[in-house]
Image: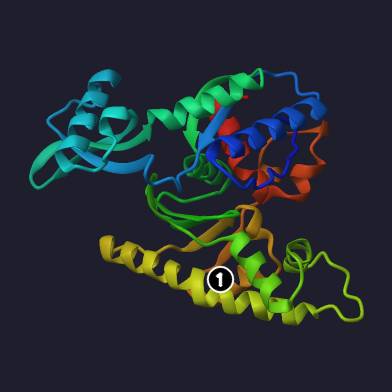
Amino acid sequence: MITFAQSATIPQVEGDELAQMEAIRDTLNTLVTESNVRKKKVVIAVPAALEEEVTMKSIFIPDLPIDVPKEVMKMNVRAEFEAQDFISYLDDAEIDCHVEGETTFDGNHGLDVFAVAVHRDLIERRVQLLRDCGMFPIAIDVDFLALARLVVTTTQLSDEEDIAILDIGATTTDVGFYQHGKLYPYPPILFAGMDLTSHVAQTLNVNEDEAEAYKHGKEAMVDGSPEEADVWGVLEDKLNQELCLELYGHFDAYTREFPEFKPSKVIISGGTAQLPQLDEFFTSQLAIPVDVLHYVDRIAVDANGEVAALKDNEPLFSTAVGLALKGGL
């Protein structure tokens, strides 16, 4: 049951990674202190967008029984990563995997395995951050996997249904397809909410805070301010020039890989997913029905808890709720 939800904005700090980590630590400490959060066991995510440190692959492992011990499976996955030269940091990678089922490939019987590799340094940085804040990690996940878990848990999908999932955050847009109980992540798109805010600010000659408010339709329209239609026109142009072109490429790649499948709908999440008209815009551009992720009415929520922020901003909290589902928090 969800009993509490709160968020905080991490300031962007000029300088090295250490300075940014200090800003994250300070923000997290303040959020926990002011929220009176008592639980110390947490599940944390690493970002799928860090492709040099996070790798997700579907792998075929031949000649293994489905009940093979987990450690043996990990050894085989590591060997396959090495044989295929999938990642440059294999010696420093922590690997986990999930057996999707038995399958046959090129006449060989074996296992279909979904594998994740994460650079050990990235994990250690996340763990140290939590410990500095007096917290103890019980699991580490990939943010896009957490979102997909929430989508599958709360969306009524038939066994034959094929969907696309977009997580449109502040700096990147994660893309994946879900078919027959299996997730197929695609490379992240390096365009998202902050790019739109900067474009609005430059085009309308306003500051970043004003641009963010205009973007979400929250700025009062007064004399001299841009009309709502003008703001959306600015956003639409940039979305067409940048994000849509990348999305077309991902959808084309998916249909080439799986010509027998076509997504029946697209589910969008992330803070940027709440832009007015964005679902309608993507529906027209992709020619597929697009829905913003909603899950509050499908997950137990404590009516007496502090959950107003969640109910007013579901897409922003989707990864956190997906992580909680993993940890059983």
Q: Could you tell me residue 251's position as x and y percent?
A: 39, 66
Q: Residue furthest toward the front?
A: 15
* Picture residue at 56% right of the left edge, 55% below the top: 171
Mark yes or no: residue 44 visible: yes
Q: Residue furthest toward the left?
A: 107
Q: Could you tell me residue 292's position as x and y percent?
A: 63, 58
Specify the quadrant of the image occupied by residue 160: bottom left
Above-or-below relation of 213 to 224: above
Specify the quadrant of the image occupied by residue 74: top left
Determine which residue is flagged by label 1.
282
Above-or-below relation of 267 to 235: above
* Picture residue at 44% right of the left edge, 67% below the top: 247
Mark yes or no: residue 69 visible: no
- The amino acid beneath tag 1 is Phe
Please state, as top left, top right, bottom left or bottom right, where the N terminus lies in the image: top right
Q: Could you tell me residue 165's position as x and y percent?
A: 49, 55
* Picture residue at 29% right of the left edge, 43% below the top: 58
Q: Is mark 1 on a helix, strand or loop?
A: helix
Could you tell whether 111 is left or right of 176 in the image? Answer: left
User: For the residue carrying disc 1, how many other residues have a C-alpha within 10 Å: few (<14), some (14-19), or many (20+)?
Assistant: some
Q: Could you tell me residue 24's position as x and y percent?
A: 64, 36
